[in-house]
Amino acid sequence: MFVTLPKVFGAMKGGAVVGLVFFLLVMFAALTSSISLMETVVSIFQDKLHWERKKATIIVGIGVIAIGTLSCLGYGPLSMVKLLGMEFLDFFDFISNSILMPIVAFLTCILIGHVVGTKVVSDEVEASGRFKKRGLFQVMIRWVAPICLVVILLSEILKVLGIISV
């Protein structure tokens, strides 16, 4: 989005205006999304630590700004600081996309496939019609997806450790 679209807007007639409006809308979408994500953390601090909303919001906001600043400065003034050989933004991207997402997806598969049971999901799907691939879903969620997710997670970790290359 930040590499290709500016080129597209630059080649368009009136692209500067369209690009400005587009990226302003993207900024507002990101802002509203971040507010909803921050609300969850603020709520947890309120419930678990019995903090007032204002205190929780300020502390969470300071934490988010601190981590965000590290990401913003990672290719500039802080480019000499590396985590696992990566700049801050690349490191946070690696942790969220290559580590946390596969772990959460794996745990979701285990929860739905083995703890709660696939019947809950199947019944919900069948509430709006026939679930044609119910058996395939059960096999995929219980066995195939968890194995694939473990392979993905391990391959990402091995890549970052330099044991395998792409």
Image (spheres, helix red, strand yellow):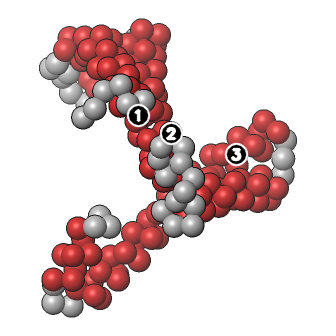
- Give the x, y percent position of residue 49: 82, 39
Q: Are marks 1 and 2 in contact (CB under 8 Å)?
A: yes
* Residue 155 visible in the picture: yes
Q: Which image quarter is the N terminus in?
A: bottom left
Q: Secondary structure at mark 3?
A: helix
**Residue 18 in the image: above or below residue 100:** below
Which disc, if any, is residue 43? 3
- Residue positioned 42% across, 9% down in the render: 114
Amino acid type of disc 2?
Leu
**Residue 166 in the image: above or below residue 41:** above
Packing grade of label 2 (10 A; few <14, some 14-19, many >=20) is few
Q: Is residue 92 left or right of residue 154?
A: right
For marks 3 and 2, give the one nearer the viewer: 2
Q: Quadrant of residue 99?
A: top left
Of residues 110 and 82, which is closer to you in this image? 82
- Residue positioned 21% across, 90% down in the render: 14
- Give the x, y percent position of residue 71: 54, 58
Q: Secondary structure at mark 2?
A: loop
Amino acid type of disc 1?
Val
**Residue 71 in the image: above or below residue 116:** below
Amino acid type of disc 3?
Ser
- Residue positioned 66% across, 45% down in the render: 41
- Give the x, y percent position of residue 144: 26, 14
For marks 1 and 3, give the one nearer the viewer: 1
Q: Which residue is mark 1?
A: 160
Q: Earlier in the sequence, mark 3 or mark 2?
A: 3
Of residues 72 and 17, which is closer to you in this image? 72
Which disc, if any, is residue 36? none
Packing grade of label 3 (10 A; few <14, some 14-19, many >=20) is some
Q: Which residue is mark 2?
A: 84
